[in-house]
Amino acid sequence: MEIEFVGAAQTVTGSMHLVRTAHGTILLDCGLSQGKRRESYERNKHLPLPIDEIRTVVLSHAHIDHSGAIPLLVKSGYHGPIYATPATRDLVTIMLRDAANIQEQDARFLNRQAEKQDLDTEPVVPLYDEQDVLEAIGLFHSVPYGHSVQLLPGVSLKFLDAGHVLGSALTVLDIEENGTTRRLVFTGDLGRNNMPILRDPEVPEGVEMLIMESTYGDRLHDPIEEMENKLCEVLTRALARGGKVIIPSFALERAQEVIYSLKRLRATGRLTGVSVYVDSPLTTQLTDVFRLHPECYDAETRQLLVRRSSPFEFDGLRYIESVEDSKAAVADPRPAIVIAASGMCEAGRVLHHLRAIIEDKKNTVVIVGFQAPDTLGRRLVEERTQVKIFGVARERRAEVVVLNGFSAHADQADLLRFAEACRKGGKLKQVALVHGELKQQNALAAELSKRGFDRPAIPAAGNRVTF
């Protein structure tokens, strides 16, 4: 058996890994690389995959850096099955259609920019369109948590709950070769324990090869309770100045977690008298999907549903869908809290809100998730004094606050505990770290080595490991 690390190798986005067995080749995830518009477009338009070789695809969860290239794979000739949990299938149906729409908008923008600058370049064409998305969705097979299915002769799949986002899964592959069955586990993105809404990550038994994410491999998150206190302090400070608070948020999971925290702050009387807007049609649609999958919820959230109290509704909260209402929210000078996508500030309605508030020091931008290099979100985290929004340089006078405790990714301690639990419950021989920047991966590998793990691998793109 051989594993080739194609994407999210010594970087965070573009998750793709090939598992070659005697029975055929399996693709784990098929994500888009994210970053600067034109650079990411060039990276994504040519899939670095042997498409004719791939027999089946397994998707860990719906985030675009894990799922976003699936329609391009299908457009390029793949027509085999794609396996995911029921919640992930429902989510990607919405998210991939949205991704196709964003690509069309980006192509128009880049082509207009090239025309204005009289650049002699090839026109930008969307990677795929809605028809490609619909063809891809038709290939999906839903597999509930804990159920085993045969992917290929001699290869079976079981999903366990990864606790990262709704429907996220640990991929457990049992692969028989030469009379011996070996167990490979791919974490996808691993969640945290004791987070609101979702269940904690499960721990698989009998793991021999572990492919583990490492996004926050060099740091620890603050407890979620402390994050709510810090969020309350930031909101109180900004609103007292008469400012607006803009929270760029990933439409899947992060937005719902922030909404739930605001609901709890409102319920305890710590956040009153201010309007809260969710200005993201995608978030609204995805929140509707959350309501369809209570099987993914933890006990506390299920109790809310029993009492007919939605985790995603409270007085003063308004979901905005129309462009006109979005423009009105942007233009309204009154204090408010606005949750808007995209999470890395590279597209979507959040850009209009940032353009309106970024130059006024009474306003605040709250960053609640990982920001990839070369994104506007990363430049805000770095507190650059000048940032470009819609191609125009603007002075950043607004306060920027980073609250990484809301992250749905496991931190270093979570990752170490998970790896040790896998070792305790089986005969773990190899660990490969993916989905992280090199600095974070080196730190995590060093900690794993201290705990007796034998030479954790940090594969680069194109590297292969024989197991």
Image: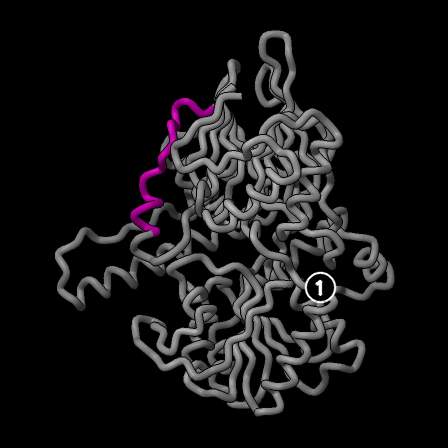
Q: Is residue 225 above or below residue 265?
A: above
Q: Amino acid at mark 1?
A: Ile
In the rendered image, which residue does mark 1 sit on? 224
Is 47 in the magenta?
yes
Is 365 or 324 nearer to us in this picture?
A: 365
Q: Position of residue 372 (x, y in %)?
A: 45, 57
Query: Residue 445, how many percent across, how many down?
Result: 55, 41
| 98 is higher (above) or lower (below) than 455 | below
**Residue 439 or residue 267, whichever sits in front:** 439
Rendered residue at 51%/65% (across/down): 341
Residue 120 placement: quadrant: bottom left
Q: Position of residue 44 (x, y in %)?
A: 35, 45
Q: Which residues are magenta?
A: 40-54
Tell me, yes or no, whether the highlighted magenta stretch contains residue 53.
yes
Color encoding of the figure: one colour
Image-quadrant location for residue 182: top right
Please state which of residues 289 and 245 is positioned toward the viewer in this rendering: 245
Work out whether residue 80 can be spotted.
no
SS class, disc 1: helix
**Spot occupied by residue 72 in the image (x, y as percentages of width and height):** 39, 40
Q: Is residue 318 visible?
A: yes
